[in-house]
Image (cartoon, rainbow, N blue to C red):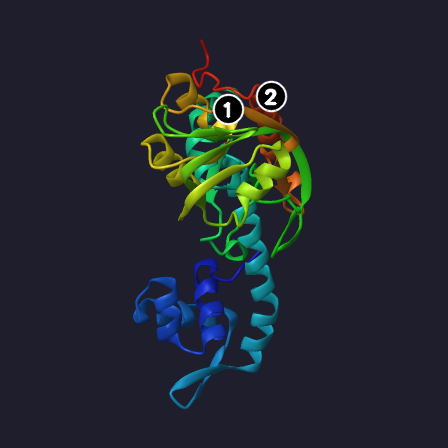
Amino acid sequence: MRLPPLSALPAFEATARLGSVSAAAQELGRTHSAVSKQLKALATDLGGDLFERQGTGLRLSARGHRLQEKLSPMLHELSALGNSLRRETERPQVRVALGATLATRWLTPRLANFYCQHPLVQVHLIMSGPHRNMDEEQFDVMLSYDRLRGPFWGTNPKGPMETLEIGDTSYGVVCAPDYPVTRTGAGLEVPLRLTHAGAPRPWAVWEDLSGQPVTGKAEQEHPHHILALEAAAVGMGVSLSEYRLVAEDLASGRLIAPLGFVAFKGGFQAGIMAGGRNKPGLDAFLAWLQTAARPATLQDADCCV
């Protein structure tokens, strides 16, 4: 079997596609002289010129056209096969889109436990929310917990998603222990209600859900939920929160929940992108997530004891 000089074939393909030795050399990271020598060696081996001069550039000769027609698809197939084989040796990566508050206060402290159980799977977190254009992001699954913001529709700009229930949620009013709140029948009266961007009417939804109105003399919006929670913790006002996000602060006494928490069945949801079930590691991550979400309390992130 006699093959053409294999090292010269990428130089030929790039020159044929770009119409310039200089452009091909730049794309391949080689010198103009090196690419020219490879093209000359290839033409000599194949018995004739593969290019013709056209002004300041090059065009394929008839022999060059025949070579390009066969070579280009072969190189693309070989490149795709190489990428596929390389991916088989890489750690599977699950790309998870979620809000910064859920990532910071709940998921990240538990990832050590996941990695202990699934050391070959890598979780890549992508922050979602009203400040991000999610149709430009590539992710496999989106997590949603804030039913005070509204229902999880299981759709995004990329198309419909398969929805999966991760667990139940519960919501409550939280504030610093010494923050001045006044009981008014079933609810509260407070100086300042805190909200966050992307949640247009959380206090009205809370009242509908709980039957416990919280009236405020003023209202202040924060760009992120986590900032509203921090403002509540330092005594600036009262905020609404899902229990998982504040469990540690409640346990330490940094926050209190004067009206307790109201349960919401199946409020913690995952949206799986089309074809995502075929992603290595995703099913393992979702199964682990459902287990981790069962008790709405902070779990020990340590593992392998």
Quarter location, residue 211? top right
Label 1: which secondary element:
helix
Label 2: which secondary element:
loop
Quarter location, residue 77? bottom right
Q: How crowded is mark 2: few (under 14 residues within 10 Å), some or many (20 or more)?
A: few
Task: Tell us which disc is closer to us: 1 or 2.
Answer: 2
Image coordinates of residue 149 in percent, x first then y, are 56, 44
Q: Do the residues labelled 1 and 2 touch (CB within 8 Å)?
A: no
Q: Can residue 145 be seen in this view?
A: yes
| Amino acid residing under circle 1 | Phe
As drawn, 34 above or below 203: below
- Which residue is found at the position 50% from the left and 52% from the top? 137
Q: Mark 2 points at which residue?
A: 294
Q: Mark 1 points at which residue?
A: 114
Front-lying residue, 303 or 171:
171
Image coordinates of residue 282 in percent, x first then y, are 60, 34
- Image check: 165 left or right of 192? right
Front-lying residue, 103 or 249:
249
Quarter location, residue 41? bottom left
Quadrant (top left/top right/bottom left/bottom right) for the C terminus = top left
- Image check: 47 left or right of 55? right
| Amino acid residing under circle 2 | Arg
As drawn, 213 above or below 45: above
Front-lying residue, 106 or 2:
106
